[in-house]
Image (cartoon, helix red, strand yellow):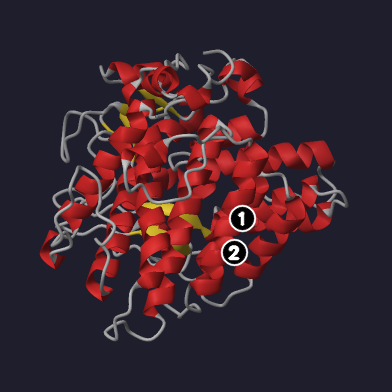
Amino acid sequence: MNISINRIQTLIITLITITLFSACEKFLEVKPTDALLADNAVYDAKTSRALVNSGYSSLKSYSINAALNLAVLPGDNVFFGGSQSQNIELDNHAFTVTNSAIVGAYSANYALINIANWAISEIPKVDDPTFEQGEQNKLIGEAFFLRAFSYFNLVRSWGGVQLQLNPTTDLSSLGSISRSSEAETYTLIFQDLAKAEELLPEDDSQTRNKLQKAIIKAFRAKVALYAKDFDLAESEAQTVIQLAKYSLVKPYQKFFEVPFLSSESIFEISATSNNAGTNGSMWFPASGTPRGSFEFRPTNEIINLLNDPEKGGNRKALLATRGEDVYVNLYHTVSPNINPSYVIRLADLYLISAEAKVRKSNPNLLSAVADLNIIKERADAKLYLPTDLNQDQLLKAIWEERRLEFPFEADRWYDLVRTEQAKNVLGVEKNFWLFPIPQADVLSDPDLNGGNNPGY
């Protein structure tokens, strides 16, 4: 029986997540015969809702923790000032097969995939008149997005991965899944997004923290950029940009001011006083109020760029000063911590559109400059004239703008890898642009044939 250690851990995490989240719903009224979910654990509207809600909970946990660690620490905007070895390794690009941050992220994505697989498999079988109109389809659509989200995290972090498409009902169901290629993984992601869009409700004018059709289009634009389908990336980005529901806020910092959920947010994972969000304490200095551990510190280079009025403009609001310490002010609420996770913002779609227009087979440079200048104008930064840049210079300007627009969100490392800049900017050889598959999986899962990503 081909079973890896982390895939067994995934089952345990899935069970614990669902049990804890839905205890008030009496989700596990049935008694499983082993440590896995029973086949009849989803049997009515309440248990269906509880299952998908547990997926949202896992999505939030990943987005405010692992996603930031893997995207921010290996980049060039933040350096780690703490003592945890796993984060020191990420900061120094010394990725190891036993790094607990990497192992935890890998397992967390498969745990969320297992939740989604259960929902996709079991909710369609439920016959319960207490479902609200369209609710059953909505829950299934949300599950398809959650699975697409997790496989996107996996493919851009580890390359092509093992595609688990069925809920795990017993240990034997884990076996015999070979590793897929990156192309095959992206194909599945696009298929899942298509199903999600088909089943989710039309957008209302306010919701930004629950899945609706526009979020799927926005996320598809981002996935398409990574998959190098530039025509699709441009088309989907422009479709969302044209929606009246969304608009850039000004000044820049307005999107991360309380009460959050600004008109710029396309998908934002909210936090409350009883359900904490992104931890700001690791970004705050150890002296003064609020007091933090100051483990995540902005580099001098990003400080200088954000404070440059022609480049950073009013994005210098991302930084604050306490004594001689310059620190990141994006995740600024404490007691309670209600900092959300900004999964995708409208600014991202303008820059996706701009990049796609430059890189597609029939480039439209003038339109790309216009998209880029919309972001620069909002930031009160210096605009480009249509004739200022050739194609290569414009592409680099867009990439720099992404660095300035999202310096402390979950993008920078992945942007450097997908644009093949990681060697020139960070000195990281291409063999180490993907994270290693955890050692426990490689050693225990025969389907991996003892292989890992290049360099490990």
Q: Which mark is residue 340?
A: none
Query: Which is nearer the eye, 6 or 221?
Result: 6
Q: Which residue is mark 1?
A: 190
Q: Using the rendered view, name the quadrant where residue 340 is placed.
A: bottom left
Kindly indicate whether the residue at mark 2 contacts the one at mark 1 (C-beta within 8 angstroms). Answer: yes
Q: Which secondary structure, mark 1?
A: helix
Q: Give the left or right position of residue 55, taking residue 307 as reference.
A: left
Q: Check the image and report above or below for 22 versus 326.
A: below
Query: Which is nearer the eye, 335 or 121?
Result: 121
Separation (CA) of disc 1 from disc 2: 6 Å
Whether residue 378 is visible: no
Q: Check the image and report above or below for 364 versus 137.
A: above
Q: Residue 71 location, x and y as percent?
A: 46, 34
Q: Residue 332 location, x and y as percent?
A: 27, 47
Q: Check the image and report above or below for 247 versus 57.
A: below
Q: Which residue is mark 2?
A: 194
**Extreme residue toward the right, this view:** 362
Q: Give the left or right position of residue 60, taking residue 159 as reference.
A: left
Q: Residue 405 location, x and y as percent?
A: 53, 46
Question: As shown in the figure, which amino acid type bears the numbered disc 2?
Answer: Ala
Query: Which is nearer the eye, 221 or 52?
Result: 52
Q: Residue 443 location, x and y as percent?
A: 41, 17
**Residue at x 25% of width, y 46% of height:** 36
Q: Give the left or right position of residue 452, taking residue 30 as reference.
A: right
Q: Give the left or right position of residue 266, taking residue 421 as reference.
A: left
**Residue at x 15% of width, y 60% of height:** 30
Badge 1 local density, few (<14 within 10 Å), some, or many (20+)?
some
**Residue at x 73% of width, y 50% of height:** 229
Q: Using the rendered view, name the quadrant where residue 346 is placed.
A: bottom right
Badge 2 local density, few (<14 within 10 Å), some, or many (20+)?
some
**Which image quarter holds the N terminus?**
top left
